[in-house]
Structure formats: C-alpha cells, structure tokens
Amino acid sequence: MVEDEASAEILRLQARVAGLEKGLEERSRLLREITEELCDDDVLNVSRMAAGLPPVQKAVFLELRRTTSLTSGDVEETMTRLWRSLKRERRRA
C-alpha cells in the first residue's frame, strides 16, 4: 500500500515537472522572440519586471548615455542592433 502511494506520488510529481518544463520552454521561446524586437532598454525593463523589480524610466537611460565620447561598448551595441534589424527584415521577406 505504501509503495502504491509512493508510486502514485512519483507519477504525479513527474507529470507536474513535465508541465512546468513545457511552460518554461514556451515562455523562453516567447521571451526570445520579444527580445529580438525590442531595443536594449526595453529588454532591460522586461527583465526587471520579470524579476519583480520596477521598470527604469526612459529618462534615466538618456541621462546615462548622454556623452560625445565613443566607447567600444557603443560599437558593440550598434552592431547588435544592426544585426537584429537585419534578422527581422530577413524573416519578413
């Protein structure tokens, strides 16, 4: 009788884990799609909200980026945005 209960509990937990894994896969797919369409600032805010943190105001991003100096980070971000836009265009074609 104890073995039957234990087996039933294991089956119930395995089904629950399978359901959670499927939900996680779907959420991950959706987040990957969303992040391809959003700018980096919006991706940061989506990540913050998913973690239960408040979003950062757009004005904060503008203050942080206001400079005339070029950094290697600017080049990397620009290239990332360029490749994202090309990927989107390729999918639409």
Image (tube, helix red, strand yellow):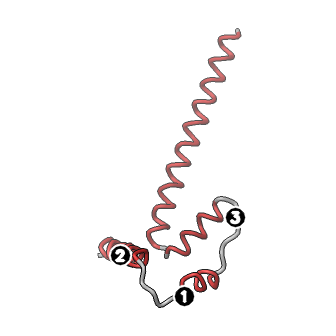
Q: Which mark is residue 66?
A: 1
- Label 3: few (<14), some (14–19) or many (≥20) C-alpha neighbours in 10 Å: few
Q: From the viewer's perspective, is 59 left or right of 42?
A: right
Tell me how many marks there are: 3
Q: Mark 3 or mark 1, which is nearer the start of the sequence?
A: 3
Q: Mark 2 — residue?
A: 79
Q: Mark 2 or mark 3, which is nearer the start of the sequence?
A: 3
Report the front residue among 38 and 77.
Answer: 77
Report helix, strand or loop for mark 1: loop
Report the front residue among 22 and 66.
Answer: 66
Residues at marks 1 and 3, CA–CA distance in whole angstroms: 25 Å
Q: Name the front one of labels 1 and 3.
A: 1
As shown in the figure, which amino acid type bears the numbered disc 3?
A: Leu
Report the front residue among 69 and 76.
Answer: 69
Residues at marks 2 and 1, CA–CA distance in whole angstroms: 19 Å
- Position of residue 54 relative to residue 8, above or below, is below
* Residue 66 spot, x, y in % from top left: 54, 88
Which residue is drawn at the image coordinates 29% and 73% (left, top)? 90
Q: Are marks 1 and 3 in contact (CB under 8 Å)?
A: no
Which residue is drawn at the image coordinates 66% and 23% (left, top)? 9
* Residue 93 spot, x, y in % from top left: 29, 76
Report helix, strand or loop for mark 3: loop
Q: Which mark is residue 53?
A: 3
Report helix, strand or loop for mark 2: helix
As shown in the figure, which amino acid type bears the numbered disc 2?
A: Met
- Position of residue 10 relative to residue 67, above or below, is above
